[in-house]
Amino acid sequence: MITIDDFNFEDKKALIRVDFNVPLDESFRVTDTNRIEAAKPTIIKVLEDGGSAILMSHLGRPKGGADPDLSLGHIVDTVSDILGVTVKFVDDCVGENVKKAVDALQPGEVLLLENLRFHAQEEKGEEEFARQLSAWGDIYVNDAFGTAHRAHASTTIVARFFAKRKCFGYLLAREIEAIDKVMETGEKPVTAILGGAKVSSKITIIENILEKVDHLIIGGGMTYTFVKAQGGKVGDSICEDDKTGLALEILEQAKAKGVKVHLPVDVIAADDFDNDAKTRVVAVDQIPDGWQGLDAGPKTLEAFGKVISESRTILWNGPVGVFEMPSFAKGTISIGNYIDQATQAGAFSLVGGGDSVAAVKQFGFEDKVSYVSTGGGAMLESLEGKVLPGIAAILDQG
Ligand code: AMP
């Protein structure tokens, strides 16, 4: 893998695609600086080599034209504070003003370009727009995992103009390594914990993952489609009746591949989808009508805990209950605790994709697992086994 460490940036201009798509409050202050901090090591490496950095990113979803509310100008001071360098800003990402600013840039300096998505050509992946962007740098660095699954001009197409002068930044390299550790090179036993609401949204992941893991733990709302498929009573639990055939097929495939599937045996059932609903613990296949399973039960957690504690590589995607409601968050917290313990005992654990990251942050497991992915959709597509266009564009050094 070709990374930023393979280049010396002395007197070079690095064109770096970062993911500064950060949340802003009503006064346009950055409310979560994680993504900026995550890109810092890459930017600092360029500056310490004696190079300069030209940063490009999108912010929000402007409709293909300039939108002052979504200007990256709002974040310049925050980026300056985090980097410890006064960041310069230019009010566009292509054109004469940018050329002037880039030409004037000295080693050790950082220039932030305006929101790429103010130009519709960015999301269209237009080659001419990518060519204009490419003029700003000697070396192209992609450090934006969150957009690596998009074939946009700045994430993928621009790389065509940097034959043998393109590489991954530290953040993107770490993401690739973490996924690789789980999907390819991980120590066995490898366990995937898949939760979340629906089988239909996870089917491609499940199919791909069956090739890679020894244990598959299924939790959350997906459970009930599997239970019903096997003839169980799921009451009013969330269930995709049209996916029961698929659920049985998955179980068959798992058996054929020697993957052990672990489904809940008991659940916390509630008489309403409400934090204050009445609850009771019931067998997963005996949920009375009028009741719905909203969290994993105690026997289930014990069994899941045993599998997790014996795993050397762990992937976690999706909560095992409706964690947004405190009454049904205990299962998800327990899973986090088991993964924490396994990680302390030397296992490699990766959390990523969609809501699992929110759950991990909410319950403070961020520093207790080996790696939390920064990309929701990009992570999901990686788990589906897709080669992300932004990554392929660097791997192909031509
Ligand atoms: P996903 O984005 O597919 O990972 O789904 C996450 C969502 O699944 C969260 O909002 C959870 O509240 C929801 N979820 C987890 N377990 C259940 C359940 N038993 N019933 C309904 N929704 C659930």
Image (spheres, rainbow, N blue to C red):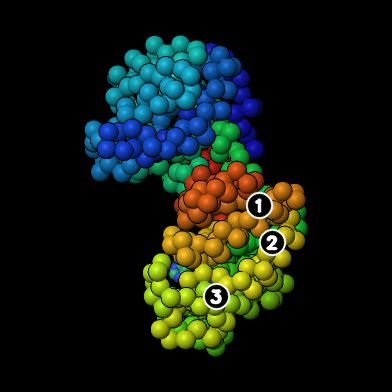
Q: Is residue 268 left or right of residue 117?
A: right
Relative to 176, say whether 142 is above or below. above
Q: Nearer the viewer, residue 110 or 97?
A: 110
Percent of width and height locating residue 138: 50, 22
Which tag, 1 or 3, sits closer to the chain's start? 3
Foreground of the two, 354 or 220: 220
At 69% from the left and 53% from the top, the residue drawn is 341
Residue 274 is labelled as none
Residue with the mark numbered 1: 340
Q: Are marks 2 and 1 in contact (CB under 8 Å)?
A: no
Q: Which corner quadrant holds the N terminus? A: top right
Q: Amino acid at mark 2?
A: Ile
Q: Nearer the viewer, mark 3 or mark 2?
A: 3
- Which labelled disc corresponds to residue 308? 2
Identify the residue shown where x is 42% and y is 26%. Answer: 79
As drawn, the label of residue 267 is: 3
Quadrant in which residue 56 is drawn: top left
* Nearest to the observer: residue 165 or residue 335: 335
The answer to whether residue 245 is visible is: no
Q: Is residue 92 left or right of residue 19?
A: left
Q: How many labels sit on residues? A: 3
- Real-space CA distance between mark 2 and mark 1, rounded to the nearest whole angstrom: 10 Å
Q: What residue appears at the point 72 percent right and 48 percent down from the top-left corner?
A: 344
Amino acid type at circle 1 is: Asp
Q: Earlier in the sequence, mark 3 or mark 2?
A: 3
The answer to whether one can see residue 147 in this image is yes
Residue 89 in the image, given as x and y percentages of width and height = 35, 21
Q: Cβ of disc 3 within 8 Å of ligand 1?
A: yes
> What x and y, as percent, mark residue 216?
64, 67
Q: Quadrant of residue 282?
A: bottom right
Say what secondary structure mark 2 lies in: helix
- Mark 2 and mark 1 lie on one chain; the one further toward the N terminus is 2
